Amino acid sequence: MASLGSTMISTDLSASFWAAAAPPPPPTGRLEGGKDVDVAIVGGGFSGLSTALHLAESGVACAVVEADEIGSGASGRNNGQVIPTMSRADPSAMVAKFGQERGQRFAGLVRDSAETVFDLVRRHDIDCAAEQSGWIQPAHTPGRVAKIAERRFKEWQALGAPVELLDRQQTESLLGSDAYCGAWLNRSGGHINPLAFARGLARAAIGKGAAVFTRSPARSIARLPDGGWQVRTPAGVLRAGRVVLATNAYSDDLWPGLKREVVPVFSFQMATQPLSDNLRKSLLPGRQAMSDTRSDLHFCRYTHDHRLVTGAPLLWRGDLDRRLRAHVAARLQGLFPQLGAVTFDHLWCGYVGMTADYFPRLHELAPGVATWIGCNGRGVALATAMGPELARWAGGHARLDELALPVTPLQPIPAHALARRLARFMLWMYRRRDAREV
């Protein structure tokens, strides 16, 4: 349990709808004794497991050590939307950040990231309630419609993404809501049960020969005399030529400075009771994933049994459970008046890893040790797509500077402890900005 204000809300993953609906994980156990592999991977979420799967498929001996259970971090707690864009960066911003060639290469990775997820689901027959029904981003003001039409839609269309620009009437038809001024749609997106997907990745990786150890937190990483690396857990040791750290928002002090490069922002998710047949005909009838253009994001998607999964942050955490349920219910009713009274069967929480500039980072922490960090709310697609990239490097098929995400130095956020405490007060600024937009 974790104390959040005056209310006790469970941070146990079992409180989530995903845990209630997911198939069981593959059998795993603690790392005990010593094990020699080519690549050691720290973190059993999308990024680490996707890396392990792609390494194992290419015949590279690898092992994953996870501090808790498979998908117990952000990978198993998020909304499950598979979104092939960045939260605040279009292709032109990627080029401005990384240069023409590297920016376009990264944009290509992002463009194809949702397809990577669903291809893995199909290829490995992963039971995760996957629906490649598309992702829609509706605009809450006319100004945001203009930005989508003039930049976002055109830039992704020019890169070959399967996108469509929607006017107000088309948006209302797809959403079942007249709350928006227009939208754009990416057909490659969709949604999954994220915990089930993580468990499925682990099962596929193990099936290809990877080792996955749970309840095995990495306590230290040390250089060996032969140039390799040793990852020590409470009961065992991995020895490897290369190490991939895949811990993102749940990074700790394992590598100095890494956890101070992201601000872990608390995110609440909740699932409604199943909607009736009549409601489903009028509310997101195409079952697309939806997240809008507000800074204080409004979002939702269906589950396999026709619930809506949504969520929201709160600035003040007193009486949190009651206030959060009332706030999110009112938000849903504002978008979809036909819902009537809204009740929630499940409420859970976890961290999202945010960087100062909303871009992810790829680092060579030392010769033979690499990490990427900073999903910024796009972890399902992006973290999965980074797996084959990291596997190319870890398996010796590419230099780190040849990957789609450029290598940059580790840059811890100054006054990180203060930034963490102040992060939730950004919500106040976001809501003021949303209210002022036209």
Image (cartoon, rainbow, N blue to C red):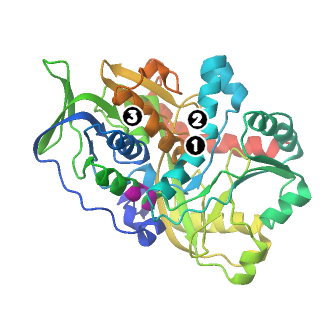
Q: Is residue 347 above or below residue 246?
A: below
* Residue 432 % position (x, y): 74, 43
Residue 147: tell me if it is visible: yes
* Residue 109 % position (x, y): 58, 35
The tag earlier along the polypeptide, 2 or 3, is: 2
The answer to whether 285 appears left or right of 299 in the picture is right
Q: Are marks 2 and 1 in contact (CB under 8 Å)?
A: yes
Magenta span: 196-200
Q: Which residue is mark 3?
A: 391
Kindly state the secondary structure of the residue where label 1 is placed.
helix
Query: Residue type at mark 1?
Result: Ser
Q: Are marks 3 and 1 in contact (CB under 8 Å)?
A: no
* Label 1 crowd (10 A; few <14 / some 14-19 / many >=20): many
Nearer to us in this view, 374 or 201: 201
Quadrant where the N terminus sits is bottom left
Quadrant where the C terminus sits is top right
Real-space CA distance between mark 2 and mark 1, rounded to the nearest whole angstrom: 6 Å
Q: Is residue 300 above or below residue 141?
A: below
Nearer to us in this view, 104 or 251: 104
Residue shown at the point (91%, 60%) measured from the top left: 169
Kindly state the secondary structure of the residue where label 2 is placed.
helix
* Residue 364 % position (x, y): 38, 21
Q: Which residue is mark 2?
A: 109
Real-space CA distance between mark 2 and mark 3, rounded to the nearest whole angstrom: 15 Å
Query: Residue type at mark 3?
Result: Ala
Query: Residue type at mark 2?
Result: Leu
Kindly state the secondary structure of the residue where label 3 is placed.
helix
* Residue 354 % position (x, y): 53, 37
Residue 354 in the magenta stretch? The answer is no
Q: Which residue is mark 1?
A: 113
